[in-house]
Image (cartoon, rainbow, N blue to C red):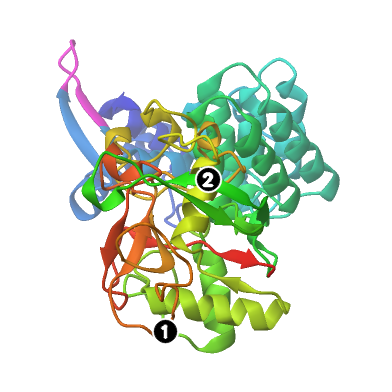
Amino acid sequence: VTIRRARAEDIIASELPQYLATQLPDDPTARQAMCRAKATGLIEGIKVESGILVELGLDTDGEPLISFSHLTFQEYLAARALAGQPGLPNSLIGNLPSPAWQEVTLLYVDIKQDATSVIQKLIALAERNPEAWLGAARCLNEKVRVAPQEREIVLRGMHSLLSTQDQNFRVRVCELLATVGTLESARVLVDVLEKDSVWDIRYAAGNALGRLGDPRFVSDQPIMLDVPEGEFKMGSNQYSGEKPIHSVFVPRFQISKFPITNSEYKRFMEETGHAAPPDWEEKNFPKGRANHPVVNVSWYDGVEFCNWLSQKTRRNFHLPSEAQWEKAARGTDGREYPWGNEFDSNKCNVFESKIGTTTPVGIYIEGASPCGALDMAGNVLEWCSSLYEPYPFRENDGREKLSAEGARILRGGSWYFDQVLSRCAFRLGLDPHNRFYVVGFRVAESFS
């Protein structure tokens, strides 16, 4: 807000008598002159000593103009003034849904330490203006009082907004639920992530879950998918390391639907004392990335995770063999990518997708493999149990010996590499001691 300096002095001068301890003259003219002089000095002092006020030149009539140096000062002082009034001020009621009044409203409820009356008014406005639901949700601050009934109504209203046709609005709802949501909100966001047809909204839901807490990963046991026994065509004729195409029989096994996430790996660390990946700070994964795949883990880290999980659950978890991984990724029809034979950067997180980092697991639902596994193309390269040996693949030729020395297999491509590495048949070998920011793992379970 910009105002004539003379007008500001008039306003201050009219309010000063109730605050001054100095005895004022009885003469009205003299009293007004004294208050005006003090107002002039006050504005000058504020401008020079604190920098809260700045001069902005002259208006068209040649009158000096002043303004707050930053909008925050104006918003805070407006909130203080409103909080000093009895009840819910009309000037606030009339502007509640307005984005321009968002900070004033939040400061007001923080000063009052009670958001119930503001939220009740916003709920009443929400039928005509859905923006009011977002305003009400922002007031759900754990530091201020909110009646439980109002909290429940607001969250239900927010959940209903996730079905609106406005995609940008749905993204905003997801982002806001990350800060004010509950366990029920998290379940709603999982539903959005798994079913919404728009990638941007699934991405927003995934990011929100990364901050709020993702209920997909609260169990000690990963979500596992069945891969029936049988033969499949392994390899390809495109690169020498993938030749020849050959049939491999794989007994029935299960594979995790997603790569192992940061939150799952942290649970393993907490229970075993295992060292954190080098990119973690004070044994904490990067903020907001609970449901991103863990990276910077060696092959040995993956093996130790599987051993811990097996002991904890009394099941037979391990890194997938190279054959298990490829069969889970491509099924039995020899497809090029988990979803088919044509590359599509909208179905995976690779270099061509232009994301530039890992993404929450499971948001590329169109990129599912035949068994339903997600992120098998892109996001992160994944360790397999197998040594990097020439084809044909033979499980009993020593390549599955965990104590053997040599490079171990990586599969699946990553956000950093292009589409070539995301092909189902592509294989890399890497020293099992190495840790890279593009390498993670998933787990398998065998039954024989």
- Residue 256, image x and y in percent? 59, 57
Asked if labels 2 and 1 touch by Cβ distance under 8 angstroms, the answer is: no
Question: Does 62 appear in magenta?
Answer: yes
**Tag 2: amino acid:** Phe
Part of the protein shown in magenta: 58-66
Q: Is residue 72 above or below residue 226?
A: above
Disc 1 secondary structure class: loop
Residue 18 image position (x, y, % from top left): 52, 47
Q: Where is residue 195, by image quadrant? A: top right
Q: Residues within 10 Å of mark 1 (few under 14, many from 20)?
A: few
Left or right side of 396 for 111: right
Outermost residue to the top: 60
Residue type, label 1? Ala
- For the point 51% across and 63% down, the residue is 320
Front residue of 258/205: it is 258
Image side of residue 6 versus residue 394, left or right = left
Give the quadrant of residue 151: top right
Quarter of the picture holding the N terminus: top left
Dot 2 corresponds to which residue?
Answer: 232
Which residue is denoted by mark 1 in the rendering? 275
Report whether residue 69 is seen. Answer: no
Question: Which comes sooner in the sequence, label 1 or label 2?
Answer: 2
Q: Nearer the viewer, residue 174 or 198?
A: 198
Note whether 95 is above or below 316 in the view shown. Answer: above
Farthest residue, direction right: 149
Residue 279 visible in rendering:
yes
